[in-house]
Amino acid sequence: MDRIVISGGHTLRGEVRISGAKNAALPILASTLLGRGECVITNVPGVKDVLTMSQLLVLLGATITTEGDRVAIRADQLRSTAAPYEMVKTMRASVLVLGPLVARWGEATVSLPGGCAIGTRPVDLHLNGLVKLGAEVSVEHGYIRAKAQRLRGARIHLDIPTVTGTENLLMAACLADGTTVIENAAKEPEVLDLAHFLVKRGAKIAGAGTDLITVEGVSVLRGADHEVIPDRIEAGTYLVAGAITGGDVYVNACRPGHLEAVIVKLRGTGADVIEGKESIRLKAARRPRAVDVRTFAHPGFPTDMQAQMVALLSLAEGTSVVVETVFESRFIHIPELQRMGAEVRIDGNHAVVSGVAKLTGAPVMASDLRASAGLILAGLAAEGETEVSRVYHLDRGYERIEDKLRGLGAVIRRVKGSTGGAGAGQTP
């Protein structure tokens, strides 16, 4: 099992280029199942989750050619409509093939999804929406089974603005007979990017990026070219890397408008944040100030930036309160931060962070994708050496993170194939 080893205490300076958004690329790749013709997707990040989705599409019968960040896909014919547990267990986004398979091919058998251990994320909203669209849906032996001769347009109200639920139902509605209205839809930039791609293919979608999406079903979707939006969470992670090390970091090839909630909080810590058209520069304060953070659906503060922000606030002057409203188990990284000297008290979905003057390096263990990033950021600022194990989580969503951090002046390396350096709670 790979580990990341960091020698902390180095100020980060320089420019880093942001990769394409994993959470936009995954639904876009899944949506290629909806129609014939070649789809050429560029700015696709080279991360494990993208590889897993590509392998799943090939298993279903799609043909894929990859060259750098360019992926060409055709799904003219499929040989299967079943996504097995072996493919789905490591990545929740695999469930995104459900809507396209039912809409175009009339049936789907998809394993209940896995992914990060950050709490319960039921797919009930996906399934209830498909039922309203006319599908017959059952869950048997750990698999979702859905059938429909042709889906019918319907009005669907989501109890919570689930991102993958919105994306699944949006894709399914594109080929439904009639009009579909999705109420309380997710407004994340990744949902809007998916909609832009589907419109290029001939879909009729209005309201994407708002909480009310209307889809007029069409009979067929064609091929199209599309460039994936930049990864806002990767961009935010490098901004915090600059802030936590007292550095001066220029984040390029990003969209500042996708990060407004993060930028507001970083400015609240005392950092000077300068927004360009496709760039953000952060000049850090000598020591960050405490700020309160509450995660929420877009355009609120993203839950995917919570772990990184807690790492920064652990060194802030004063006491911060971080409220996690999205996932109930997303504070499981905090005991690892405490091993490094952070003073954090958890009370339900609240984390009370009392800033300390310094962190010290320690062996720690990542519990999920964003926790991995948060622990690496803490290691960048800590005295001595920090060893982060279980970084296979990290590889699911960050492209060449150690190379990019080295380019900013970090002393960081990957140690391959060893199980040493476990943090608290590691099991054999």
Image (cartoon, grey):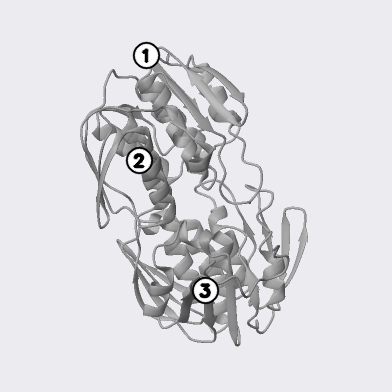
Few, some or many residues within 10 Å of mark 3 (<14, 14–19, 20+): many
Mark 2 vs mark 3: in front: 3
Residue underneath mark 1: 177
x and y, in percent, of residue 405 in the image: 42, 75
Give the residue drawn at x 38%, y 74%. 403
Within 10 angstroms of label 2, few (less than 14), some, or many (20 or more) residues? many
Quadrant placement of the C terminus: bottom right
Looking at marks 2 and 3 on the same chain, the residue that comes earlier in the sequence is marked by: 3
Counting from the top left corner in percent of width and height, residue 206 is at 35, 29
Position of 85 with respect to 358 (left or right) is left
Residue topped by disc 2:
28
Q: Is residue 38 above or below residue 179?
A: below
Identify the element where label 3 is drawn: strand
Q: Which residue is mark 3?
A: 4
Q: What kind of element bears circle 2?
A: helix
In-front residue for pair 181/289: 181
Between 183 and 373, the residue placed more toward the observer is: 373
In the rendered image of this protein, does residue 249 appear above or below residue 365? below
The kind of residue tagged 1 is Asp
Nearer to us: label 2 or label 1: 2
- Residue at (57%, 53%) from the top-left corner? 303
**Cα–Cα gap, marks 2 and 3:** 31 Å
Q: Amino acid at mark 2?
A: Ile
Q: Is residue 186 placed above or below 124 in the rendered structure?
A: below
- Dot 1 surroundings within 10 Å: few (below 14), some, or many (20 or more)? some
Q: Nearer the viewer, mark 3 or mark 1?
A: 3
